[in-house]
Image: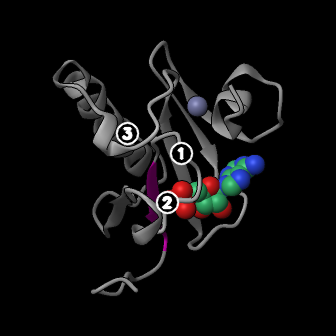
């Protein structure tokens, strides 16, 4: 399958891996929008949020728990951080393997662009 993030997960394309377990990996975003900009993604290929099955609920919950752990590890849990998932092109999704953006280390504005 021609999927950039599947290739990163398999080690076929290099990336800075910052966390991994049996279900997910987290990497540095190649074009960081904040001092801490990580991408948390499932090892399993799921193209968009629209493709999630009810059976994936635990996986998504686990991704949120990984975000919480990263915030603690980076010592920004109290100051705050943001998690974002873009679904489809209109929302800015450019890689069609679901991923949670983890952003922190600077004040965040609302609404996002
Ligand atoms: P999205 O636009 O929500 O699909 O997010 C895709 C993200 O992947 C963007 O923030 C990109 O900067 C990031 N990205 C693209 N290619 C790579 C790569 N090879 N390694 C790490 N991050 C990447
Ligand atoms: Zn994939």
Q: Which residue bears the numbered disc 1?
A: 96
Q: Is residue 36 left or right of residue 32?
A: left
- CA–CA distance between discs 1 and 2? 7 Å
Q: How crowded is mark 3: few (under 14 residues within 10 Å), some or many (20 or more)?
A: some
- CA–CA distance between discs 1 and 3? 25 Å
The segment highlighted magenta reads 100-105
> Quadrant for ligand 1?
bottom right
Magenta stretch encompasses residue 88: no
Q: Is mark 2 on a helix, strand or loop?
A: loop
On the image, the x and y values in percent for residue 102 come to 45, 56
Sooner in the amino-acid sequence: mark 1 or mark 3: 3
> In this orientation, which residue lies closer to the viewer: 97 or 2?
2
Please say if the residues under marks 1 and 2 sit with CB atoms less than 8 Å apart.
yes
Q: Which residue bears the numbered disc 3?
A: 69
On the image, the x and y values in percent for residue 92 come to 48, 68
Rendered image quadrant of residue 113: bottom left
């Amino acid at each position: 399958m021609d999927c950039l993030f599947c290739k990163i997960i398999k080690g076929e394309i290099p990336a800075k891996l910052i966390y991994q377990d049996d279900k997910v990996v987290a990497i540095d975003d190649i074009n960081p929008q904040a001092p801490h900009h990580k991408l948390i993604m499932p090892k399993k290929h799921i193209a968009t949020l629209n493709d999630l099955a009810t059976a994936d609920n635990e996986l998504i919950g686990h991704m949120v728990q990984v975000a919480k752990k990263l915030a603690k590890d980076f010592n920004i849990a109290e100051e705050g951080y943001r998690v974002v998932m873009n679904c489809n092109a209109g929302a800015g999704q450019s890689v069609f393997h679901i991923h949670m953006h983890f952003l922190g280390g600077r004040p965040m504005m609302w609404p996002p662009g």
